[in-house]
Each structure stands twice: as structure tokens, then as C-alpha cells.
Image (cartoon, rainbow, N blue to C red):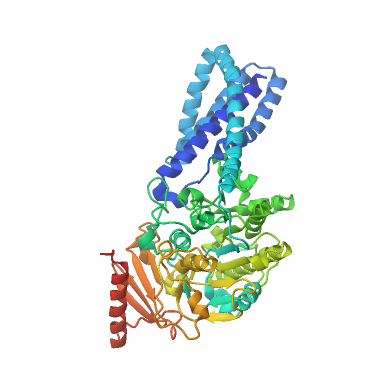
Amino acid sequence: MGLIALWLWFAIVTGLVEAAGLELFQKINWANWAHTTHVSPKIFWVAPLWDIILFAPLTLLLIVVGRLMRNPLVIRVSVFLFALLMFYDWLALPERLVHRSAFILAAGLATVTFRTFTKHESLLLRFVNRTLPFLVAAVLVLGAGIEVSAWMLEKSALSKLPRASAGATNVVVIVVDTLRADHLTAYGYEKPTSPNIAEIAKEGVLFENAISTSSWTLPSHASLLSGRYSYEHGATDVKPGGVALDNRYPSLSEAFAQHGYRTGAFSGNYLYFSSNLGFGRGFIHFEDYFHSAFDGFTRTLYGRELARLFFNREKIRTLLIRLGIPSIDELQPSGPSSWMFRERAAEVNHEALNWIDRDSRPFFVFMNYFDVHRPYTTPPGYPRKFARLSTHGLYLQEFNSATPESRLVAYDECIGYVDDQIKAFLDELKRRGLDKRTLLVITSDHGDMMGEHGLYAHRNALYRQLIHVPLIFWQPERIPIGVRIKTPASIASIASTVGDMLGFGEKEEFPSPSLIPLWTAKQPIDSWPHPLSEIAHLPHESRNSPSRYGAMTSLVTPQYHYIFHEKFGAELFDWIRDPDEKTSLLKTREGQIAAAALANEIKVRMSPPQ
């Protein structure tokens, strides 16, 4: 009984302190957000539970050894080993020490604990036995309290909603993270990557030149929800305390709630679209972290260590998948000390549909699919459409050394998977009879570089491959069929467009112009505002990334794409004749005149109001 009490006591104390540390360090390490493990309050019961499970094999071994040897020293040895695990967990958690140093220091502290226990064994065992029930109760109360409070808060928020207008239209916004428009069938791509999205586009309105407000997730999502550009909403990176989007401007989700809508967000991108970054404002329900047991496991220190050492090996992954643990596929190493947890689009669909089914009130659902993001993997066993890959995609270690052709193939495979999941979600809406009462918006937050301009990934520049994204509006009997808009338009206008369609978007709330006139006007509107894109100075990007050396701003007109870098100066491309943006026109007289006019336009637009 003494061993079992020690096991539970050390595991629970380890987990509770670990949980507090994870909550604290994600705020302290805000400048290193991409390499920090992120959690929500659920960690206060998840971490103790997993540490109990992870300490169990050692406890079983000690019990067996104790019965075989009948040696009272086993209790003392167990204290040393449990203390070693506890102190190593706490010391390695901040990631300020290399693992070897953390282990050596933990061994020293465990030795001190062992000696103290040896001198006061009976006293300390009584202390463990007396405090253990309180620790167990604390975990149970925390777990129940966190889960019940979340349920009660959502229920309370629903009860306070005003009555929605009769026949209110549901709204679903699907953001396919990292999706380039030029790799979609509907946008003329030579491979049939996305036949389902193409069919949806044929039944609705497609914007041929939709432009994102930035080339990475955080500022783009802030624009999607606020209807404003980065220079206005200020969410250009994570700020001290781990906040990005503040409350200076209203959010689209808040507007929906004020008009009686249930609001739910479902995120596959836990790094930069999560509730704790400020995106939860206005959403009654937000699902980001801890969507599965495996996700919870890998947010604990020992869970991450085991995943790094064992679970990322292909043979082990394959075995676990065959044993019915497909969530192993969520694990994607993104660096030497950080972990990217990928929730598949199918699971995002499942979460959103389950939530939709809970209530009959109209809903606003905002979904982020993360499957097209590097390192470009599709679920195990998913049918391949374009090539035979050694795996179901490229794990990061393969991604970094892959050929451009392999990356393109893997990227297109991921688009094919997401295309199927969008169809699956829409089919479920139709099965529920919700399709005709639902406005569907499909877009992306940014694209990805595939070697153009010597760049890969994103968050590094503002070239067309990074900011040209899909934008489709679909609703039977309400949205025109088969309309294609050539006018460059910003995704910042999605909020005002949706509000305009539903009759509650105030100009002061979402100042970017509604896109409805572009599909109702009989003639192209020549005076339409040119889409603006921005990226802040990001000094920790790779050495060949322009954003490492200064902030950038760009403007897209029906002919030109003007890019200004605060250190390197300007570039101007004729994206109609030169869609790959290989030749800058700044050496020509025509280019210099156009660039000067666009530079002045940016200055005027971004100047504070007088």
C-alpha cells in the first residue's frame, strides 16, 4: 500500500506543478510562441492523469521487485526514482536547460529527497497518506469544475442570446490554412486537386483575385474576424502575456452573438488560431486544444519526450495506427524542442457538426483546416491521387530535404484530402436539411512558397504565391450561380459582406467594403479599393526571408502588384503578364510612375485620421 500511495502522490504533485508551469510559461515565453507547448485550463486534470498512467509501469516493477526480494529498501528506492521523475519534469519544463543538465540536477535533488526520507521515513509516509486524499480530491474537483464550468458558461451564454430573426441564415466560414489559389481546379490548376470545391464554385460566386491581408495565420485571421487590416487591428504577432488580437475593434463573432446566433470556432491550427490568443472573443464555443487523448498526452512533458523518441518512427506509427490509434497521425515535429499537433479536417468537421446538432438556433461556425500546412501529410491509408509516396506525405525530417517536385506532389495530395472533407461537411449539412439556409464561405489565410524567389513556406514575404487565396460564396437560391469576379478583393471584406447579407453589419464595425456590389453590378467597378497586405518585421525568420530584415507592405491593382520593404525598397510586378512575378518593372519609366502612385496610395490609406 505504501508504494501505491507514493506512486499516486508523486504523480499528482508532478502533474499539478507541471500544469501550473505550462500555463505560466506559455505567457512568459510569448516571444518564442511557436516553440512553446500551449495549453488551456484542462491541463490541470490532464497532466496529473497522464503522469499517474506514465508512472504506473515503474510502480508495477517496484511492487514485483519488492515481493521477490522482500527488502524494505524498495520503498526508499521508489522515493528516489519518483523524486527523480518529478524533479526532471519540473526542471525540463521551462526548456532553459538541456536535458542532460536537467537530469543531473534532478538526480541531485532526488538524492537529497532520498536522504531526507531515510531519516524521517515513518513521518513522511504518514504525511503522504494524509495528504493523498486531498490531492486526489483536488484533481477530481479541478477536472469536474473545469469541464462543468465550461458547459455552464456556454449554457448561460446561450440563455442570454437575444431572439434571432425569423428564418435567419446560418453561416459557415471554412479557412483552409496555407492554401494557394493557383493550386485549385477552379482557378485553372492543371491537376484535378479540388473537383468538389470547383463544383461549389460553379454554384456560387468565385473571386479570381482574392488577396489575403498577410502571409501568415495570425494577422490574417485577425482580419477575417475584425474586417480590418493589420495596421488597424494590430495583431501582427504574439504580444507580452500571450495575446494577439485585443478588443479595440468588434469581432464578427460578437456581431453574430448580438443578433441571436450561436457562435462556434473549431481550429486545426493550435499555434496561431486559438482562444487564448484573443480569438475566442465572441465565440460561445471554441475547440482548440485537447481534442483527443493523444493530444492531451503529448502536451505533457513525458508525453512529448516519448513521442519524440518513439512515436515519430514510421514502424511504430504504423503499428499504432493498425491497433486503432489513428490520432498518432496528429503528431508533427516542427523543431528540436517544439511540437505541432495536427487535427485532421475530418475531426474538425465532426466537432463542428456535433456542436451544430446540440441546438436548433441559427449558428455561425468558423472552421480552420490545417491539413495543407507543411509538412504536407494526409491521413494514413488515405487514397493517393497524384503519385506514390514512400509514406502518406512528408514528415518534417523528409520535408526539409525533399525535392521541389516531391513537395508539390505532397501539397497537392493534401489539397485533395481537404477537398473531400469540404464535400463531406456540405453533404452532412444537406442531410440535415440545412444547406439552403446556410451561407458557406471558403477561403484561406495565406499561401505557401514552393521555391519561387528562393523561398519556401510563408511568413517571409508578400509575393503573389503567398497572398493570392481562394474566395467562394455559396448558398442555394440566394447567391448567384457561376459568377466569377476578376476585380482584386481583400479577405478583410468577408466580415462586412456576411454582415451585409444578413442585414446587421454596421459600416463602423466592419469598414472594408461589402463585396456584394461586385456580383450585383452589371459592369466592373473601376473604383474598387485596392487590397492591402502587410507583414511585420519578424527578426527570427530564416536568413533568406525578407521579413527577417524589415516590415513589408503591398498593394494589388487590376494590373500591378506593388511591394515595399522598409529596408530593401520597392518592387513592382505586372501580375497579369507576369503571374510568377519574376521581373520587377521599377527600371522602366512606366513602372516608376505606377510605383510612385501606389506608394502614395499606401501612405494615404495607412495614415492616422486627422
Q: Is residue 338 visible?
A: no
Residue 558 in the image, given as x and y percentages of width and height: 42, 82
Residue 44 in the image, given as x and y percentages of width and height: 55, 36
User: Is 91 left or right of 540, judged from the image as shown?
Assistant: right
Residue 588 picture quarter: bottom left
Asked if residue 87 is positioned above or below residue 540 in the image, the reply reads: above
Asked if residue 243 is positioned above or below residue 451 in the image, the reply reads: above
Residue 168 picture quarter: bottom right
Residue 570 in the image, given as x and y percentages of width and height: 31, 74
- For the residue pair 371 and 556, the one nearer the viewer reads as 556
> How many numbered circles does the render carry?
0
Residue 201 in the image, given as x and y percentages of width and height: 60, 76
Residue that protrudes farthest toward the left in the picture: 610
* Quarter of the image that includes the C terminus: bottom left
Q: Is residue 62 visible?
A: yes
- For the residue pair 251 and 105, the one nearer the viewer reads as 251
- For the residue pair 340 and 467, the one nearer the viewer reads as 467
- For the residue pair 126 and 274, the one nearer the viewer reads as 274
Asked if residue 112 is positioned above or below residue 558 in the image, the reply reads: above
* Quarter of the image that includes the N terminus: top right
Q: Residue at x 44, y 66 (%)?
A: 215
User: Is 545 left or right of 391, judged from the image as shown?
Assistant: left
